[in-house]
């Protein structure tokens, strides 16, 4: 679907797109939750991705190795535990556009954000502010507030919130440039999202990094809603660090082990850090010496040995992404989410406003929707959708998020979402 002229609103057209989809086979590799005798229309990969069918056996294999080999599984397992985190490194680096030494899978997103800020937020009286977007994800807000307080500063003055200057609260590059021009000399760190969780807006990492570096700021990104959704090309972006989770688009399970990127120019950084034994130089780690010598690259920020049962699902998921290719997934996503946006505009413009930018390159899979009408309309529609097996998610105060995900969603899923909205609206009028 390359143009509006090709768009057709009927179910037959949607099914024809699915029949021609070169990635359609990946859907069968995931467990689609049931709804009665049918499958759910699952549009919530932006919150929790579906279970890959191969994950169950991968976890069972690790349990079997534990049962059979116990401690020796560190060396004798099918995937030996000692180097296990290296088994995800190449595919993870490819997914986020990084050099292998720049990425590591560890901890949770917010824990990794704190670890990065310990090293990269080094405030001075003259330069101690942090730039974030207004209505950032709460965990980021809490983390940044606490880091500011730990250094003896007041979040009320040290946190600069980037206001939306576009319709529906999205943020232009001009707004980023203006705030950096105005406050850049006192901003120590810029922490912005790759994709904003509430609006679904994609941010231009490379341009933002260049603007901020020109003002002497460190730049980090929260990529929770970006990794596995859009190409992020972290190395070429030039950003200093990034953190993300793997339980959304990367389908690695609830509370999945997270990811972290540290640019190669910081590979031998002497910045202060919170150290742990698994971040120690691998060649001397087991000499158990008292002095910490960091492993070069992102590995040097590790604290403890990797959680094998949490890494197994990530290993499976990254293998799927390696076969699908993030560029092919992005191409499908542009068509699929574009189709959903066109279908909403064509079929239910009197019901839904789309908050996400209309420009395809400024959005990923997700569309954020606001229901027109009385105040309770949004929640009412959300609950109606769920009762019909159409699963999105709700974000206060009034946003329904739906994300047709390229690995396992179909054009037919987008059509069924809009058709269900039509039935809800007809029943209220």
Image (tube, grey):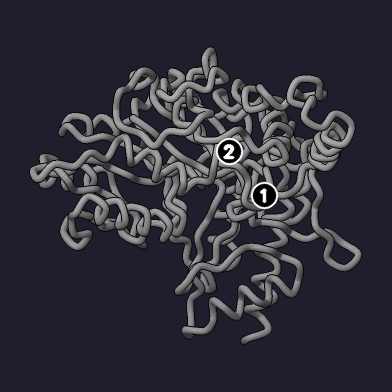
Lateral position of residue 407 relative to residue 287, left or right: right
Query: In percent of the image, x 61 and y 73: which residue is there?
Result: 382
Front-most of residues 131 and 30: 131
Lateral position of residue 360 relative to residue 187, left or right: right
Q: Residues within 10 Å of mark 2 (few under 14, many from 20)?
A: many
Give coordinates of residue 304: x percent, y percent: 55, 35
Above-or-below relation of 247 to 425: above
Front-most of residues 120 and 227: 120
Query: In percent of the image, x 71 and y 25: which residue is there?
Result: 323
The answer for how far apart the CA atoms under marks 1 and 2 are is: 10 Å
Give coordinates of residue 11: x percent, y percent: 75, 55
Q: Are marks 1 and 2 in contact (CB under 8 Å)?
A: yes
Does residue 180 appear anywhere in the picture?
yes
Tell me where residue 211 sits by quadrant: top left
Give coordinates of residue 158: x percent, y percent: 18, 54
Is disc 2 placed on a helix, strand or loop?
loop
Q: Which mark sits nearer the N-terminus, 1 or 2?
A: 1
Single out the residue that lies furthest toward the top. 283
Above-or-below relation of 338 to 391: above
Read off the residue under disc 2: 228
Read off the residue under disc 1: 49
């Amino acid at each position: 679907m390359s143009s509006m002229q090709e768009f057709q609103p009927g179910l037959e057209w949607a099914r024809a797109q699915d029949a021609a989809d070169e990635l359609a086979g990946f859907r069968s590799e995931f467990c689609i939750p049931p709804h009665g005798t049918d499958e759910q229309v699952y549009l919530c990969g932006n919150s929790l991705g579906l279970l890959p069918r191969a994950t169950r056996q991968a976890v069972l294999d690790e349990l079997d190795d534990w049962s059979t080999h116990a401690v020796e599984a560190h060396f004798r397992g099918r995937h030996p535990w000692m180097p296990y985190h290296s088994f995800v490194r190449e595919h993870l680096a490819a997914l986020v556009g990084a050099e292998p030494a720049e990425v590591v899978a560890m901890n949770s997103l917010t824990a990794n954000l704190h670890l990065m800020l310990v090293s990269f937020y080094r405030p001075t009286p003259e330069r101690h502010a942090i730039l974030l977007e207004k209505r950032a994800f709460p965990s980021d807000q809490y983390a940044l507030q606490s880091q500011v307080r730990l250094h003896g500063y007041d979040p009320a003055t040290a946190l600069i919130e980037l206001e939306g200057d576009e319709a529906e609260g999205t943020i232009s590059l001009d707004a980023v440039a203006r705030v950096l021009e105005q406050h850049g000399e006192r901003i120590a760190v810029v922490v912005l999202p790759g994709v904003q969780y509430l609006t679904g807006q994609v941010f231009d990492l490379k341009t933002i990094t260049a603007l901020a570096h020109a003002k002497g700021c460190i730049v980090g990104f929260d990529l929770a809603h970006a990794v596995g959704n859009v190409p992020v090309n972290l190395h070429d972006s030039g950003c200093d660090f990034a953190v993300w989770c793997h339980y959304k688009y990367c389908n690695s399970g609830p509370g999945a082990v997270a990811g972290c990127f540290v640019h190669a120019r910081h590979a031998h950084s002497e910045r202060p850090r919170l150290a742990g034994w698994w971040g120690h130089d691998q060649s001397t780690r087991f000499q158990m010496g008292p002095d910490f010598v960091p492993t070069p690259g992102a590995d040097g920020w590790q604290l403890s040995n990797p959680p094998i049962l949490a890494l197994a699902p990530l290993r499976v998921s990254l293998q799927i992404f390696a076969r699908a290719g993030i560029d092919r997934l992005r191409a499908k996503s542009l068509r699929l989410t574009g189709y959903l946006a066109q279908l909403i505009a064509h079929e239910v413009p009197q019901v839904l406003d789309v908050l996400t930018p209309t420009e395809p390159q400024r959005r990923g899979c997700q569309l954020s929707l606001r229901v027109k009408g009385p105040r309770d309309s949004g929640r009412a529609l959300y609950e109606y959708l769920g009762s019909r097996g159409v699963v999105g998610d709700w974000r206060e105060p009034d946003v329904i998020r739906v994300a047709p995900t390229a690995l396992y969603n179909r054009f037919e899923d987008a059509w069924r979402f809009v058709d269900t909205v039509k039935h809800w609206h007809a029943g209220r009028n």
